[in-house]
Image (cartoon, rainbow, N blue to C red):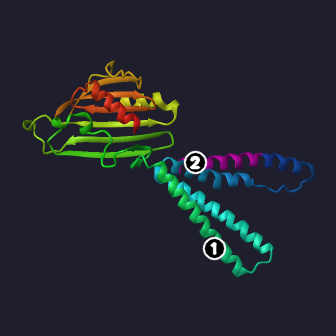
Amino acid sequence: MKERTCGLSLAVYAASDFILYFLWYRKARKNAAENQSFTPTKGNRMVLILTLVVIPLAACGIYLISQGLAGMIGWFTVVACGIVYYIQDQVRNRLRKNGTSGSKNVAVNFFISFAIFEIVFVGGIYVIRSLSSGAPFQQHGFYWENSEKLIPLAAEDLLPEQELPVFDYFQSLNTQSSLFLSQLTAEQIPEESWQEEEGEPFYLQYVLTKVQAGFLYELTRDSMMKVYSGEQGWQESQEWNLSDGTVEQVYETSVQEASFPLNRYIVCMGDRVLKIDLNFVPDSRQQETIVKILEAV
């Protein structure tokens, strides 16, 4: 984000400087030919404001918005400070015009600032909490109801209670986002101490990509299929056709990993592309559970 912002600002500034130079050069040659007068150079204040203020602030705003709840709070803080400064500046100037003493001016501005901060921040925190009240876990645009779950889709969602794994399992979660894409990576895999003679373990690993720009959907799907291609290539599957039409396309293959074979699927649903690895073939109930949970995350 920082590199793109600097690049855009420099590109706009350089283009403006380049155009202004040639306009000045043509005018200077004309003036020199007519009366040999000196032609001063001129800058462009709007370009400076655009490159030094507007573009960086816009990039900062887009970055904060893409960070979920924490970004909302940060963006709200920036906006609130700007509102307070503007109102305080207007009040200070008006009091000066009316001949109010400096001490009274400072006291009034302090009271106004305190009141505005209280109203804006308390109200803003209330609104943000109310918006996120149904999502105890929220990060980079992903959220789910049960904050006690480290990962949104786990063994307890797919297996009956009597079939839940008895091994020690490692769970991990990672999320990241940009202006156009958000990605969640999670896994529940057996610890390294697992031995084959102890029984069949449970293996779950998935990558969920949320495509926020529709024109990137096919590119995202094709890229994930290329990165996660298996030994036998992708085959289109018809087994995930849910009655509600949530699933649009499904591709499957197999890979050998972690000492046992895995079934790998690419599931296209709405604005999301899911890559999921399982060491079993999911039945219709498990397929519906996977789609229902991850489509709502």
Specify few, some or many for label 2: CA neighbours under 10 Å numbering under 14, 14-19, or 20 or more: few
State whether the magenta stretch is mostly helix, strand or loop: helix
Q: Which kind of residue does numbered mark 1 sit on?
A: Phe
Q: Nearer the viewer, residue 167 or 15?
A: 167
In the picture of the structure, the residue carrying the numbered disc 2 is 7
Q: Find residue 126 and report its horizontal and vertical position in percent.
A: 51, 56
Q: Find residue 26 and report its horizontal and vertical position in percent.
A: 82, 45
Q: Which residues are magenta?
A: 1-22
| Direction from residue 295 to residue 59 in the image, left or right | right
Q: Find residue 139 and report its horizontal and vertical position in percent.
A: 41, 48
Above or below 269: residue 23 = below
In the rendered structure, find residue 110 and report the number of the disc placed on it: 1
- Let me know if residue 27 appears in the view: yes
Would residue 57 be counted in the magenta stretch? no
Q: Which kind of residue does numbered mark 2 sit on?
A: Gly
Q: Residue furthest right?
A: 35
Instruction: Please tell me which residue is depicted at 55% across the width and 52% down the height of the picture.
Output: 60
